[in-house]
Amino acid sequence: MKNKILASIICSFLYIICHSQTIYNYTLNIDKNNQSEANLHINCSFTLDLQNSDSISMKFGGDEKLSIENLQVKTNNSLHISYYYNSALKEITFYKCKDKTLSIIMDYNYTNLSSFFIYGEGSAELWETSFGEYFYPHIPNTNMDATMNIIVPDSLSLICSYPLMFINAGKYSGKLKNILSQSITLAFIQNDVYHKTTEFLPNEISIYQIKGKECSDKRYKELLQLTKASIDYFNNIYDEDYISIERNITTFPNFLFHDGKGFSNRYNIGFISASQEKFSTYLDIYPLVHEIGHRWLGEWTLLINDGEPGAYFIKESLNEFMTLMFIRHFYGTELYMVQIERCKSEYNKIKGTQLDVPIVNIVVNNNNTIVYRKGPIILDHIANKIGYEKLIHIISIFYQEYAGKYPLKCSDFIDLVSKYYPNIKELLYN
């Protein structure tokens, strides 16, 4: 066991050495003034260290025809720079000239279609790389320091995945240290549309609701209760507090309730975005516990690529099962079994059809029944065989060993389970 831990530490150290100097002096200036809905003007600068490579690629762009306009790329010393922007692949590649370091300045306008079509009529614009909108250039799954400066008009407020200081007259600024490069998320909300309240659990949280659509007092108190209880539960399970300097999480989650289409709920590190209608009217708000659980089990900590076998078993099914484990802990076995029977009922609608595929076959999040119903059913079956507490412990070990490590594979989880229970392995391929 000691040798395994030592090897893991050495691998992590070598990974940091290999990647820590890839990009530095990163400054991201974002201007929302005089920009129409779902548009930003962006200027960014950074230094790339190509080390022994002849080129380096960064994720950049969204819709290949509409997302980027008036792109200008230059160096800060007027030297010629060689680059190629592949709009179809959403990548910009820079090529080595005579120096292995390149100081880049980029200036462009960005149109974010996912913000426009997913989140309604503009009362809240959410800018998330998770939807393939790479609105700023970055090298995925590496860590970087960044200085951010954001300007918004008086009519808007800004919510960011990382805390920024309000300077004055709509200006926000901050220095972000060692963040996951793709993890910057922004929300621009209309001040006259939203009602903000602040609570302490004991850490401060802010809740943004659409005026005239606010939830009942009972639902509001339930949100506070479940937020506090689930954070306490997951803190204990994963042996890591919600707030973690190591993972750049310095606050409890704020809640932004939007009127978006499709009821999209998201965990964005510093805030959780969710449907106002769902929050105000649905029978339960357990999906918000799921979003809180993504603080530990989710795309910002479990770095498995889309396209990898079992990607969304790792990113979503595990967390949905642990959400059910919280329900079992907080409400009792009876309500937990109600939720499991609901999973079985929905899964049975596709069981044996072409839509019924092994959970390891889900490489993008395009089959909710498999990801959110079949996945937890299989894990519940395993828990019945080996014991719930033992399976919870294995999931906790998996988080502690693999959080932040890239690349992650679904086989890493399967191998960990097999280490303790060899006869269980085949169940995870169903």
Image (cartoon, helix red, strand yellow):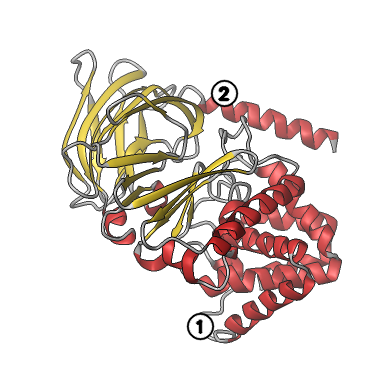
**In the image, is residue 238 above or below residue 176?**
below
Residue 87, percent from left and from top: 25, 47
Q: Position of residue 131 (x, y in %)?
A: 38, 54
In the rendered image, which residue does mark 1 sit on?
A: 354
Query: Dot 1, crowdedness within 10 Å: few (<14), some or many (≥20)?
Result: few
Q: Which residue is mark 2?
A: 17
Camera-nearest residue between 108 and 117: 117
Label 1 or label 2, whichever comes before in sequence order: 2
Residue 367 visible in image: no
Residue type highlighted by circle 1: Gln
Indicate which disc residue 37 carries: none
In the rendered image, the vertical position of residue 424 relative to residue 174, given as above or below:
below
Q: Residues within 10 Å of mark 2 (few under 14, many from 20)?
A: few
Q: Vertical placement of 83 versus 25: above or below?
A: below
* Residue found 66% across the figure and 32% down from its top: 11
Q: Nearer the viewer, residue 402 or 172?
A: 172
> Quarter-wise, where is residue 211 in the image?
bottom left
Q: Residue furthest top?
A: 77
Name the side, left or right, on which 223 lies relative to 279. Answer: right
Looking at the rendered structure, the secondary structure element under dot 2 is: helix
Badge 2 amino acid: Ile
Residue nearest the viewer, comparing 328 with 17:
328
Question: Could you tell me which quadrant the C terminus lies in?
Answer: bottom right
Residue under the image location 48 percent in, 71 percent down: 281
Residue 355: x percent and y percent? 51, 80
Quarter that holds the N terminus = top right
Q: Nearer the viewer, residue 363 or 95?
A: 363
Is residue 233 in view from this perspective?
A: yes
Q: Residue at x 81, y 54 (%)?
A: 419
